[in-house]
């Protein structure tokens, strides 16, 4: 009996040496799970993360942001870009005050959009026409997105898509503009930590716009009150789309109609970009059905396929 007890004790010791079965996960941990299965706060550069996912180790030149994602520090941000060539950014990083409410009200995701070729550029004189697949996983008649926004920045070579999740983008200075369904956000105000803003150029055709008016009133995304309690929607009765600085590109009356307004967007690096949206539905015929019959075209031209025209002015 003594021998059996010793054998049993030995097996118990061996099993104990293998370590306990991990119970760390989304149901038990608000931070992140380290390789040993221990729940960490998710706020350290060597254990950064949230939602009970595996902890990330931030690379050199990165830090763990307040929303628990690895981001570039200000010292390394924009390395190799025009910032290093002497361009002074218009702003540093300003944390989004109502980040929790933004995540909840906009239904944001913590993984990047995986839609292949979500941005396709075509040369348009001195600018570009970009086809944007902003369906975000809502296809086949669905309307609720299942993926993050498509995040991008304006470059002389075209609209460059960035590998950012919604939650990481809230604290990132890298992006200028984001698309999901008919919502277009700019990186500033309630939408992001940068200072990207826009103004509407009234009564001037897109082709004739060469700069923002001297008297321009610049707008950043502002759809939550200062106390984060009041949400401002687009005013068309749906209740869920936020009132962003670029919302005036459409009217909603049974379908997404174009207003053909021209905006000038000012980036963090001080670049001015003229911008207009020409289509929301997948093809021109579908958009025409909306414009003339005030109804969505249906399966022949699903929504979420924006066509935008833009040009860097300086």
Image (tube, rainbow, N blue to C red):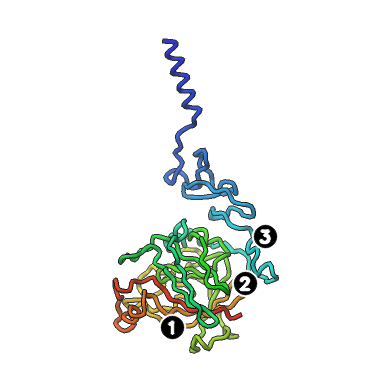
Whether 150 is drawn above or below 201: the answer is above
Q: Which residue is mark 1?
A: 260
Q: CA distance from mark 3 to mark 1?
A: 40 Å
* Whole-percent x, y for residue 132 in the image: 44, 71
Q: Earlier in the sequence, mark 2 or mark 3?
A: 3
* Whole-percent x, y for residue 54 in the image: 50, 46
Q: Which residue is mark 2?
A: 269
Tag 2 secondary structure: loop
Q: In the rendered structure, are the residues bearing label 2 and label 1 in contact, judged by CB atoms less than 8 Å apart?
A: no
Quadrant hosting residue 182: bottom left
Whether 33 is drawn above or below 76: the answer is above
Q: Of residues 103 and 296, which is closer to you in this image?
A: 296
Q: In the rendered structure, are the residues bearing label 2 and label 3 in contact, judged by CB atoms less than 8 Å apart?
A: no
Q: Of residues 130 and 151, which is closer to you in this image?
A: 130
Q: What residue sits 49% from the left and 31% below the top?
A: 19
Q: Of residues 269 and 236, which is closer to you in this image?
A: 269
Q: Which residue is mark 3?
A: 75
Tag 1 secondary structure: loop
């Amino acid at each position: 009996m003594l021998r059996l007890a010793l054998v049993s004790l030995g097996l118990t010791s061996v099993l104990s040496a293998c370590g306990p079965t991990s119970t760390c996960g989304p149901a038990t941990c608000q931070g992140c799970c380290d390789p040993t299965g221990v729940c960490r706060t998710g706020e350290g550069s060597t254990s950064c993360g949230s939602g009970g996912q595996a902890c990330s180790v931030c690379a050199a030149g990165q830090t763990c942001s307040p929303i628990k994602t690895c981001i570039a520090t200000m010292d390394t941000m924009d390395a190799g870009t025009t910032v290093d060539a002497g361009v002074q950014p218009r702003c540093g990083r300003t944390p989004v005050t109502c980040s929790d409410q933004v995540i909840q009200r906009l239904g944001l995701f913590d993984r990047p959009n995986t839609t292949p070729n979500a941005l396709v550029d075509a040369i348009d004189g001195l600018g570009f026409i970009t086809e944007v697949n902003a369906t975000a996983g809502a296809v086949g008649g669905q309307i609720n997105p299942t993926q993050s926004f498509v995040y991008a920045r304006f470059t002389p070579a075209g609209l460059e898509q960035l590998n950012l999740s919604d939650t990481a983008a809230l604290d990132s200075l890298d992006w200028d503009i984001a698309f999901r369904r008919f919502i277009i956000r700019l990186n500033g105000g309630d939408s992001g930590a940068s200072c990207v803003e826009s103004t509407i150029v009234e009564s001037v055709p897109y082709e004739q716009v060469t700069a923002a008016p001297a008297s321009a009133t610049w707008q950043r995304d502002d759809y939550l009150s200062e106390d984060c309690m009041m949400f401002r929607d687009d005013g068309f009765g749906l209740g869920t789309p936020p009132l962003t600085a670029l919302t005036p590109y459409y009217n909603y009356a049974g379908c997404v109609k174009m207003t053909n307004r021209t905006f000038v967007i000012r980036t963090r690096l001080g670049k001015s970009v003229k911008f207009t949206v020409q289509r929301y539905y997948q093809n021109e015929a579908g958009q025409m059905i909306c414009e003339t019959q005030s109804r969505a075209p249906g399966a022949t031209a699903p929504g979420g396929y924006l066509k935008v025209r833009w040009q860097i002015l300086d």
